[in-house]
Amino acid sequence: MEYYKKDSDILLAIDCIIFGFNGESLEILLIKRDFEPERNKWSLMGGFVQSDEAPEAAAYRILKQLTGLENVYMEQCSVFGEPNREPNDRVVSICYFALIDTQKYKHILSDNYEAKWFPLQQYPKLIFDHDQMIAAAQYRLRMKAALYPILFELLPEKFTIPQIAALYEGVYNIELDKRNFSRKLLSSGLIIKLQEKDKENSKKGAYYFKLNTAIYKEKIMSFLRYLPSWSLET
């Protein structure tokens, strides 16, 4: 520390933005903060990087500690470092984000920190600049979904076309032309129709489909070319 003793101390924090898809809409995972400042306020999952760990390792440790979630693939999306972003200390935060199937993880969530899923468009007021963090993560998610098949990989083994449409609508915050979307998806060859119907969420019963893994890697990019016309700024 002798070499840097003239430099000011800065705390390095981690914040985790976890988006979830429940089969119908997108959600955001939040916790109720149990310490000052802003005690009992809703917050992203956050904590500080320890002296003996890398930021990525800290992100996984913090997520597991505060929610019970583990084995969730996260990516770094942004850094927030405005001098006055927190009231008492100089804190720079590295943000990580993930998109998961909430149905697979709901039973794991820890009750110790009141971890809870909220609709992405209707979550409560958050502390500090966490709203901006979510917006930055949404932008990165939209860019990634337009270039890679991450949304298809989130779907269960069998799914309906309305489920896929709802997922894209949630990510891009748009209303799709359902008929056109369905036509492009079916013509892509990416999905295989099953004889089973989902009768719980549809009066007539929407047919289930499964991913055509034989041509998935070959055909996915042709379907994803449908996405760039959607605005990332929505």
Image (cartoon, helix red, strand yellow):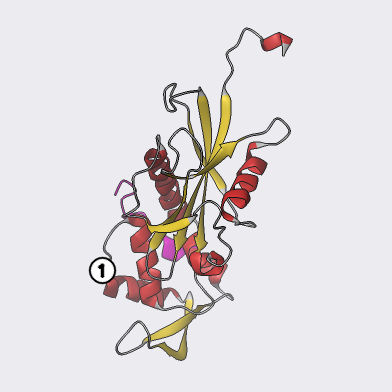
Q: Which residues are magenta?
A: 221-234
State whether residue 84 is above or below residue 164. Answer: above
Q: Quadrant of residue 13?
A: top right
- In this orientation, does residue 189 appear? yes
Tell me the residue at 54%/70% (across/down).
216
- In this orientation, does residue 149 appear? no
Which sits in the foreground, 231 or 49?
A: 49
Secondary structure under the numbered disc 1 in the rendered image: loop
* Secondary structure predominantly adopted by residues drawn in magenta: loop
Q: Quadrant of residue 122?
A: bottom left
Which sits in the foreground, 94 or 185?
A: 94
Q: Is residue 37 left or right of residue 217?
A: left
Provide residue 164's location: percent of width, then percent of height. 40, 70
State whether residue 13 is above or below residue 143. Answer: above
Q: Is residue 36 left or right of residue 2?
A: left
Q: Which residue is mark 1?
A: 177
State whether residue 208 is above or below residue 47. Answer: below
Q: Residues within 10 Å of mark 1 (few under 14, many from 20)?
A: few
Provide residue 93's location: percent of width, then percent of height. 52, 33
Provide residue 96's location: percent of width, then percent of height. 53, 44
- Quadrant occupied by the N terminus: top right
Task: Tell me the amino acid under the disc marked 1.
Answer: Asp
Tell me the residue at 73%/9% (across/down).
2
* Residue 148 lies in the magenta stretch: no
Tell me the residue at 32%/70% (across/down).
181
State whether residue 129 is above or below residue 198. Answer: above
